[in-house]
Image (cartoon, helix red, strand yellow):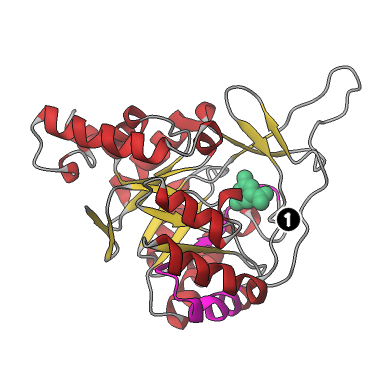
Amino acid sequence: MIKVTGIELENPTILAAGIMGTTGASLARVAKEGAGAVVTKSIGPEPKEGHKNPSMIDLGYGFLNAMGLPNPSYPDFKNELSIAKKESGIPVIASIFGGTEEEFVEVAQGLLESNPDVFELNVSCPHALGYGASVGSNPDAVESITAAVKDAVDIPVWVKLTPNVTDIVSIGDAAQRGGADAVVAINTVKGMAIDIESGYPILGNRFGGLSGKAVKPVAVKCVYDLYTALDIPIIGVGGIYTWQDAIEMMMAGATAVQIGSAVHEGIEVFSSISTGIDNFVAEKGYKDITDVIGLAHERI
Ligand code: DOR
C-alpha cells in the first residue's frame, strides 16, 4: 500500500496514459491484472481522429508513435470513465488535454461527474501542434494551466512533463508553482525513423515520440533531477518493463511508476512488477517501499 497525493494505491504500479486506456472495459481489465491505478487515454474538448497511419512503429528497443491524441472528446468519454470507476475497483486517473487553459478547465469540469480520482494534465505530447510540448515547454503556460484546473476542481492534479526541453526542472517548478499535487515524468522523447529504400519518414506524421526500453535512462535522470528540486511527489514513467526497472526509478525519486510500452509484451507485467518489488523490499529488510524512494540521492 502506498499513498500518493492522498490517493491510496494497493501497489505502486500504474497503467500509463495510452491505448489501453481507451475504454472502461480495457481499463477494468488492466485493474484485474493487478495495477495499483490506471490512467485513461488523453481526452480533449473535441473528437479527434489522430494522425494518419502508420502511427506506431516497433523499433525493438522502443516504440515510435504519433497517434495524434485520438479521442472521442469528453462528452463521449464520460460513460467509459464511469464504467472504469465502477468496474476497476482501483483509483482511475483521467488524462486530459486542451489547446488553451479554458479548454483544459472545460474538459476537467466535464469529466468531474464521472468521479475520476485524479486529473493528469497532458501538457507534453511531442507531436500535437498547439496542444502538446509547445505548451509544455513554456513554464508560464504550464503554471497557468495547472492553476486554472486546480481552481476548478477539488481532486488532485498531476502534471505530465515533456523531456523535450533543455531544463525539465524549470517546467516541474512551474507545475509546482501552479499548485500541482504531483508531476509525472516523462512523456515520450521526440524522434524520427526514415525508410532508406524510399527516403520517406515512416510515420504518417513524419516524426513522433519514442517510448520503451531506449528511454529509461532519460526518464531516470529526469526523475532524479526533479526529486532534487521539487517538494511534491514524482511519478516515474519511461521504459519500465521489470521490477528492477521500477526499483531503479523509485531510487531516483519516484513515489510510484507508470507502465506503458511494456503492456504490449503482456498485461501480467503489473503483478510481476509489484510482486518483485515486495520481494526486494523483504529481502533487503526495508521497513516498506518508502525506504527505496530517493535512495540514490543518499549514495554520494
Ligand atoms: O507519445 C505520445 N503520444 N504522447 C502523448 O502525450 C500522446 C500520444 C498520442 O496520442 O500521440
Q: Residue furthest top?
A: 197
Does residue 89 sit above or below 20 in this rendering?
below
In magenta segment, residue 150? no
Location of residue 153 by image quarter: bottom left
Q: Quadrant of the C terminus?
A: top left
- Report which quarter residue 172 is drawn in: bottom left
Residue 18 visible in the current orientation: no
Instruction: Report which residue position mark 1 lands on.
Output: 129
* Side of 102 relative to 90 (left or right): right
What secondary structure is marked by label 1?
loop
Per the rendered image, the range of residues in magenta is 104-127
- Residue located at (27% from left, 36% from top): 275
Q: Residue at x 58, y 57 (%)?
A: 41
- Seen from the viewer's position, the closer of residues 277 and 232 is 277
Question: Is 120 covered by the magenta stretch?
Answer: yes
Left or right: 53 in relation to 175: right
Compared with residue 137, is residue 294 higher up or lower down, i.e. above or below? above
Which residue sits at x=91%, y=22%? 198
Find residue 212 and report its horizontal and vertical position in percent: 53, 32
Q: Position of residue 229 (x, y in %)?
A: 31, 49
Q: Is mark 1 within 8 Å of ligand 1?
A: no
Left or right of residue 219: residue 189: right
From the top left corner, tell me how far across and down residue 220 is, in percent: 39, 35
Q: Is residue 118 left or right of residue 188?
A: left
Specify the farthest residue to the right. Answer: 198
In the picture shown, does residue 273 fall above or below 47?
A: above
**In percent of the image, x 72 and y 52: which residue is there?**
68
Amino acid residing under circle 1? Leu
Q: In the image, residue 80 lies at what x, y percent? A: 57, 67
Residue 257 in view of the camera: yes
Tell me if mark 1 has few (under 14), some (14-19) or many (20+) residues whose alpha carbon lies within 10 angstroms of its own: few
